[in-house]
Image: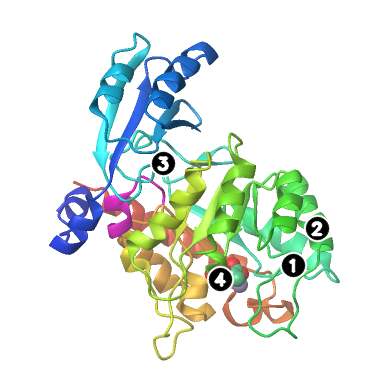
């Protein structure tokens, strides 16, 4: 059975269907790639007659416009659809207006650096869990080896969310180190931000991927701030799934917070949930990938490292993620895990293993599209 048929055959229970179909969306699609200022003013004037506002969502190739507010007014919808520069007003029903697979953003493609995520080949972000500011060379050498292994982007923790307040918490100096690694390798970089100050520092440094970790996955104020600051930019957000066993809809709705502030460049990252499966660090959840892909257009980039939490099991989880339809992976990799800090000693894989893993994943990726 072709993979797309498997995706389409995912059954929704009646309860989920009712929730899923509960909200109406009107999404305005202009004839041109973008509305001119005058055209936008005209649309906004109609919307404001009905106490609604217009949100511009800027993709790489085109803009779409969401109507926010009480949109249940057919007359407003018809007046906007009748404007000569409007191609159509899409009306769909969903709890997440913009993340929905049927929304005007359905053909939006997320790009990291020059790579369109999930288009031609599996996408890989890799790098150490944590940058050790006392040993910058370990990180820089890891970065070069990871590039050589075939990764498309480099990760590295600058500020770290640690369960134990006495564990290493990160250091702003590490931002300089990962910026240097980007300069040397030309790989786009991914770092986690946990608060407004870190967000601003990372955004000002033009960090390519802002990672929102599992502990902040439902921090709606932070999600809004990330969306607002990065609106209209090329910055991509890697949103991890909350570690409690939340529903796929809760996960997608969290991403909606970012998109609704104007940044549609969002990737969803299942990373395992708690309680853990005995022997693993968390409960692996790459299996929710088809559910996510059935409901939203956003690419799914699974994190096998935090999911299983042991270097030896990372490859199995990675292959499973692609078999389930993932677009990419975010993997912890270090040139010498025993010299690493944070999670690296237990779960980072060496770049040689990463290279092998990437090749095996490419084979799964190719086989799933065979007729
Ligand atoms: C990490 O990526 O190193 C990390 C802390 O991830 P998570 O938020 O998934 O625990
Ligand atoms: Mn980690």
- The main secondary structure of the magenta stretch is helix
- Mark 3 near ligand 1 (CB under 8 Å)? no
Taking the spot 35% from the left edge, 53% from the top edge, the residue there is 365
| Segment tinted magenta in the rendering | 290-299
Decide: is 21 above or below 40: below
* Residue depth check, mark 3 versus mark 4: number of the one nearer the observer: 4
| Marking on residue 131 | 1
**Of helix, strand and loop, which one carries label 3?**
loop
The answer to whether mark 3 and mark 2 are in CB contact below 8 A is: no
The answer to whether mark 1 and mark 2 are in CB contact below 8 A is: yes
- Mark 2 near ligand 1 (CB under 8 Å)? no
Sort mark 4 into few (<14), some (14-19) or many (20+) by Cα contacts within 10 Å.
Answer: some
**Of helix, strand and loop, which one carries label 1?**
loop
Residue 294: within the magenta? yes
| Marking on residue 267 | none
- Mark 4 near ligand 1 (CB under 8 Å)? yes
The image quarter containing residue 148 is bottom right
Does 27 sit left or right of 359 as displayed? Answer: left
Name the residue tied to disc 2.
Answer: 177
Sort mark 3 into few (<14), some (14-19) or many (20+) by Cα contacts within 10 Å.
Answer: few
Mark 3–mark 2 distance (CA, rounded to whole Å): 31 Å
């Amino acid at each position: 059975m072709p993979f797309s048929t498997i995706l389409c055959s995912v059954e929704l229970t009646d309860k989920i269907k009712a929730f899923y179909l509960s909200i109406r969306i009107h999404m305005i699609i202009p004839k041109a790639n973008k509305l001119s200022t005058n055209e936008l003013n005209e649309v906004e004037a109609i919307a404001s007659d009905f106490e609604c506002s217009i949100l511009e969502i800027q993709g790489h190739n085109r803009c779409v416009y969401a109507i926010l507010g009480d949109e249940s007014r057919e007359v407003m919808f018809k007046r906007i659809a009748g404007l000569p520069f409007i191609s159509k007003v899409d009306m769909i029903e969903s709890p997440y207006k913009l993340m929905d697979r049927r929304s005007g953003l359905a053909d939006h493609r997320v790009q990291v650096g020059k790579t369109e995520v999930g288009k031609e080949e599996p996408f890989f972000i890799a790098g150490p869990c944590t940058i050790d500011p006392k040993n910058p060379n370990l990180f820089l050498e890891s970065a070069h080896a990871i590039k050589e292994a075939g990764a498309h982007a480099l990760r590295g923790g600058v500020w770290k969310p640690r369960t134990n307040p006495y564990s290493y918490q990160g250091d702003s100096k590490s931002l300089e180190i990962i910026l240097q690694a980007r300069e040397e390798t030309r790989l786009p970089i991914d770092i986690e931000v946990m608060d407004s100050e870190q967000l601003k520092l990372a955004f000002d440094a033009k960090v390519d991927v802002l990672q929102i970790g599992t502990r902040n996955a439902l921090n709606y104020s932070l999600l809004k701030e990330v969306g607002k600051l990065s609106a209209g930019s090329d910055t991509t957000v890697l949103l991890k799934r909350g570690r409690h066993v939340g529903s796929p809809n809760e996960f997608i709705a969290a991403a909606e917070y970012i998109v609704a502030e104007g940044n549609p460049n969002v990737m969803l990252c299942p990373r395992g949930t708690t309680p853990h499966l005995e022997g693993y660090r968390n409960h692996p959840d790459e299996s929710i990938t088809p559910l996510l892909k059935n409901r939203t257009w956003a690419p799914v980039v699974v994190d096998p490292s935090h999911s299983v939490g042991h270097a030896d099991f990372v490859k199995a989880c990675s292959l499973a993620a692609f078999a389930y339809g993932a677009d990419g992976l975010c993997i912890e990799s270090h040139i010498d895990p025993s010299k690493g800090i944070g999670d690296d000693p237990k779960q980072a894989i060496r770049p040689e293993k990463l290279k092998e893993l990437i090749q095996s994943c490419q084979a799964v990726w190719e086989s799933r599209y065979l007729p």
